[in-house]
Image (tube, rainbow, N blue to C red):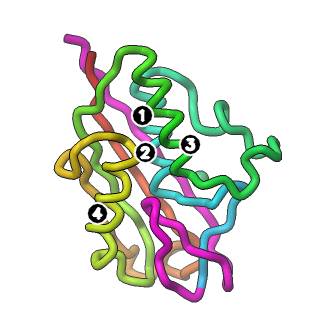
Amino acid sequence: MKIRTGFGYDVHQLKEGLDFWLGGIKVPHTHGALGHSDADVLIHVICDALLGAANLRDIGFHFPDTDPKYKGVDSKILLREVMRLLKEQGYEVSNIDSTICLQEPKINPHIPAMKTCLAEVMGIPEEDISIKATTTEKLGFVGKKEGVAAYASVLIYK
Ligand SMILES: [Zn+2]
């Protein structure tokens, strides 16, 4: 059996009045993430970790932010496509671990809904998807509420 690990990191600015898409769901908040797509930072890091594990470049390579086709695109569509690319190479996902770095709002109450959503999109059990949340103790761009960051690591096998 071939086992491979992958890692993803991403950041988006927060702007007042935008929808805040995170983990495939809309989180109620005064601010949302800014980006060419729906700016779902959690889905982006999962995509990058999966692509990295399979050595298939990165999310910007497959879905360039210069392409009008991806303007405002639902990141769940990108994640489905990434899963298709992995399946094409014969890979299955073993598990995902992720961390969202955000000062506010509190993310913990939304994690079960994110897990349900991502499990459905990826076609894997919820128990194989871990989502954690942390503030940065009011330090840096996350702590100053200027942005949201996320990290993910994955294990894939074939
Ligand atoms: Zn992103």
Residues at discs 4 and 2 in contact (Cβ within 8 Å): no
Q: Which residue is mark 4?
A: 132
- CA gap, disc 1 and disc 2: 6 Å
Q: Dividing the picture into quarters, in which one does residue 110 lie?
A: bottom left
Residue type at mark 1: give it.
Answer: Leu
Q: Which residue is mark 2?
A: 46
Mark sitting earlier along the chain (3/2): 2
Mark sitting earlier along the chain (3/1): 1
- CA gap, disc 3 and disc 1: 12 Å
Q: What is the secondary structure assignment of the residue under circle 3? A: helix
Provide residue 115's location: percent of width, then percent of height: 30, 58
Mark sitting earlier along the chain (4/2): 2
Provide residue 157's location: percent of width, then percent of height: 26, 21
Q: Is residue 9 left or right of residue 90?
A: right
* Residue 28 is one of the magenta-drawn residues: yes
Q: Residue visible at 42% across and 22% down?
A: 54
Residue type at mark 2: give it.
Answer: Ile
Give the magenta part as a residue range: 1-30
Q: Which residue is mark 3?
A: 78
Q: What is the secondary structure assignment of the residue under circle 2? A: helix
Residue type at mark 3: give it.
Answer: Leu
Residues at discs 3 and 1 in contact (Cβ within 8 Å): no
Decide if ligand 1 comes within 8 Å of the CB at mark 4.
no
- CA gap, disc 4 and disc 2: 13 Å
Residues at discs 1 and 2 in contact (Cβ within 8 Å): yes
Nearer to us in this view, 9 or 85: 85
* Residue 141 is one of the magenta-drawn residues: no
Q: Is residue 63 left or right of residue 122?
A: right
Q: Which mark is residue 50?
A: 1
Residue 76 lies, with reference to residue 24, above or below; the image says above
Question: How crowded is the residue under tag 2: few (<14 C-alpha within 10 Å), some, or many (20+)?
Answer: many
Which quarter of the rendered picture does the N terminus lie within?
A: top left
